[in-house]
Image (cartoon, rainbow, N blue to C red):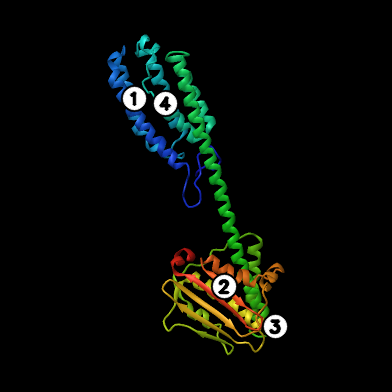
């Protein structure tokens, strides 16, 4: 399991994306290119070394190690501290060997070490794994090896050490920022997902409580059924209070029309296509629940003699359900006032559901002209919404 603390193994943001992974690919590519450069550089000057065979032996071992550890440098989880320590040992060994097998005159003239810029890949690896502090540590070790084993304190050595430390610390700091940003983004997405689930559960509770209260008000229905519904609402309320997130069922596709048919009666007329309107099961259930909330508003607020019409339109790209009544309607600003007062039937049970499905809910009304609600679900979002 990845450690999500900044600087200790990296993190992957929601969706599987990681900002730092391209940096690791760049480090891997750099090590291969730096090895190629070191081999070509030594091939052009090995005859000037006092012990050229020793140099070829070291570069052969360095080549085998670089190729063998390429997969380890694919990311912070694979690149263990053992791999990095071995990498640093190769860099230090090559630098110290350069001071032994090369001639003093060449060293004094500023001849490069056996690994040359390959050692910078080690520092970058420490930066990727542990952040800028570990990069500074690796850079300091490489710098001490240069000073102690190859040329002492010279302007060239000091210049190279400063560049190595600056590059390593900069990369390490960038990776630390990337990990912190990914951790913050992941946490924000988790909070948003939890909030959306709580809103969904609140809508279900809202609709279920209204159903129970309607049965009590009409004094209809089996007392056992009333008790069952009340028990369901108690469990849902407990889940909401404890922050639980029940998983919605995902049962393939379902015909929307039978779900809407239960709302039709002597006051509610349903007009629909002759063929089934198939949607992902959860999309159909949520859309039907939103229609139910709209129908419930008609029965509660439009008056005892008001009628309503439900129209279903099955288009290639969308499914649209319109609910229109001939009640008294409501003035402009009435919905906002109800929401401020804590009555969230329209904002959560209707609009909230459609937003979660990637759709839209439009309401139109004026005093004396009834209410018309248009619910629209895009078919292009069915799979994502159903999941």
Marks 1/4: CA–CA distance:
10 Å
Query: Mark 4 = which residue?
Result: 119
Asked if marks 3 and 2 touch (Cβ < 8 Å), the reply is no
Marks 2/1: CA–CA distance:
68 Å
Residue at position x 36%, y 9% from top? 105
| Eye-nearest disc, 4 or 3 | 4
Q: Residues within 10 Å of mark 3 (few under 14, many from 20)?
A: few
Instruction: Say which label, 4 or 3, has the lower sequence index.
Output: 4
Instruction: Say which label, 2 or 4, has the lower sequence index.
Output: 4
Residue at position x 60%, y 71% from top? 349
Marks 3/2: CA–CA distance:
30 Å
Residue 170 image point, x, y percent: 51, 32
Residue 222 image point, x, y percent: 63, 84
In this view, 235 is above or below 184: below
Instruction: Say which label, 1 or 4, has the lower sequence index.
Output: 1
Element marked by disc 4: helix
Seen in the image, is 230 located left or right of residue 103? right
Q: Nearer the viewer, residue 82 or 222?
A: 82
Residue 330 image point, x, y percent: 67, 78
| Residue 362, numbered circle | 2
């Amino acid at each position: 399991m990845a450690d999500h603390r900044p600087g200790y193994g990296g993190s992957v943001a929601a969706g599987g994306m990681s900002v730092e992974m391209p940096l690791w690919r760049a480090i891997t590519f750099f090590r291969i290119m730096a090895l190629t450069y070191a081999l070509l550089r030594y091939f052009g000057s090995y005859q000037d070394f006092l012990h050229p065979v020793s140099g070829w032996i070291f570069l052969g071992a360095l080549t085998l190690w670089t190729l063998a550890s390429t997969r380890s440098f694919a990311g912070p989880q694979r690149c263990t501290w053992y791999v990095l320590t071995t990498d640093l040992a190769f860099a230090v060994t090559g630098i110290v060997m350069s001071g032994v097998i090369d001639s003093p005159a060449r060293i004094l003239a500023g001849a490069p070490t056996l690994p040359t810029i390959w050692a910078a890949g080690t520092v970058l690896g420490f930066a990727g794994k542990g952040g800028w502090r570990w990069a500074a540590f690796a850079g300091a070790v490489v710098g001490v090896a240069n000073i102690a084993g190859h040329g002492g304190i010279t302007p060239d050595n000091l210049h190279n050490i400063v560049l190595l430390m600056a590059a390593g610390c900069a990369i390490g700091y960038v990776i630390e920022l990337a990990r912190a940003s990914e951790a913050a983004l992941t946490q924000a997405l988790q909070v948003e997902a939890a909030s959306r689930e709580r809103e969904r559960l609140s809508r279900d509770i809202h609709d279920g409580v209204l159903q129970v209260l309607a049965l009590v008000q009409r004094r209809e229905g089996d007392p056992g059924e009333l008790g069952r519904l009340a028990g369901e609402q108690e469990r849902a309320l407990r889940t909401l209070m404890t922050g639980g997130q029940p998983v919605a069922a995902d049962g393939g596709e379902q015909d929307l029309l039978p779900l809407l048919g239960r709302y039709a009666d002597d006051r509610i007329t349903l007009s629909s296509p002759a063929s089934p309107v198939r949607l992902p099961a959860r999309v159909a259930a949520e859309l039907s629940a939103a229609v139910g909330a709209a129908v419930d508003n008609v029965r509660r607020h439009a008056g005892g003699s008001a009628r309503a019409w439900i129209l279903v339109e099955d288009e290639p790209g969308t499914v649209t359900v319109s609910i229109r009544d001939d009640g008294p309607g409501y003035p402009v600003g009435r919905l906002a006032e109800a929401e401020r007062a804590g009555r969230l039937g329209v904002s959560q049970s209707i609009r909230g559901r459609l937003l979660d499905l990637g759709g839209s809910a439009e309401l139109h009304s004026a005093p004396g002209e009834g209410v018309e609600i248009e619910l629209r679900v895009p078919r292009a979002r069915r799979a994502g919404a159903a999941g």
